[in-house]
Image: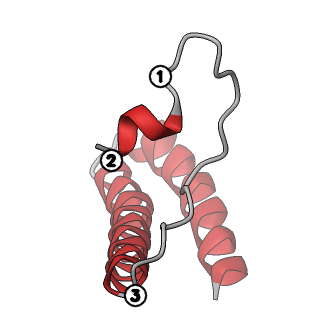
């Protein structure tokens, strides 16, 4: 499904350039923006809901939830124990 989505985006971009150059038709670019933005924002929302549910389940069990992102540089960041409170 993702491969087809990418292929459609590439084909639409090629058609949009052609339509813009030859016919001065530019509204296809807004369609491309919608085709790009909506699936990405929906994917981000699903990811946030999934993480919220995982954190809620872990907290309900009395466990510490896993960090969503690994720490890159912790020299200027507070310790984990201080952040918990």
Q: CA distance from mark 1 to mark 2?
A: 54 Å
**Is 69 above or below relative to 6?**
above
- The x and y percentages for residue 12 are 54, 63
Which is more N-terminal, label 1 or label 3? Answer: 3
In which quadrant of the rendered image does the C terminus lie?
top left
Instruction: Please tell me which residue is depicted at 59% across the width and 76% down the height of the picture.
Output: 5
Q: How is the image coloured?
A: secondary structure
Pointer 2 residue:
25
Alpha carbon separation for disc pair 3 and 2: 57 Å
| Residue occupying the point 31% across, 79% down | 56
Q: Which is nearer the N-term, disc 3 or disc 2?
A: 2
Q: How many residues crowd around disc 2 within 10 Å: few (fewer than 14), some, or many (20 or more)?
A: few
Residue sitting nearer the eye, 56 or 44 = 56
- The spot of residue 82 in percent (x, y) is 40, 32
Identify the residue under disc 3.
Answer: 61
Residues at marks 1 and 2 touching, judged by CB atoms closer than 8 Å: no
Q: Secondary structure at mark 2?
A: loop
Disc 1 designates what residue? Answer: 78
Distance from Cα at disc 3 to Cα at disc 1? 26 Å
Instruction: Count neighbours of disc 1 (C-alpha within 10 A) and say few if under 14, some if 14 to 19, many if 20 or more.
Output: few
Q: Is residue 18 left or right of residue 29?
A: right
């Amino acid at each position: 499904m993702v491969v087809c989505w990418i292929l459609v985006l590439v084909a639409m971009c090629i058609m949009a350039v052609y339509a813009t150059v030859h016919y001065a038709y530019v509204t296809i670019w807004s369609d491309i923006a919608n085709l790009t933005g909506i699936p990405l924002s929906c994917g981000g929302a699903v990811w946030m809901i999934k993480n919220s549910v995982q954190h809620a389940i872990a907290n309900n069990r009395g466990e510490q939830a896993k960090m969503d992102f690994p720490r890159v540089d912790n020299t200027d960041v507070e310790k984990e124990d201080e952040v918990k409170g």
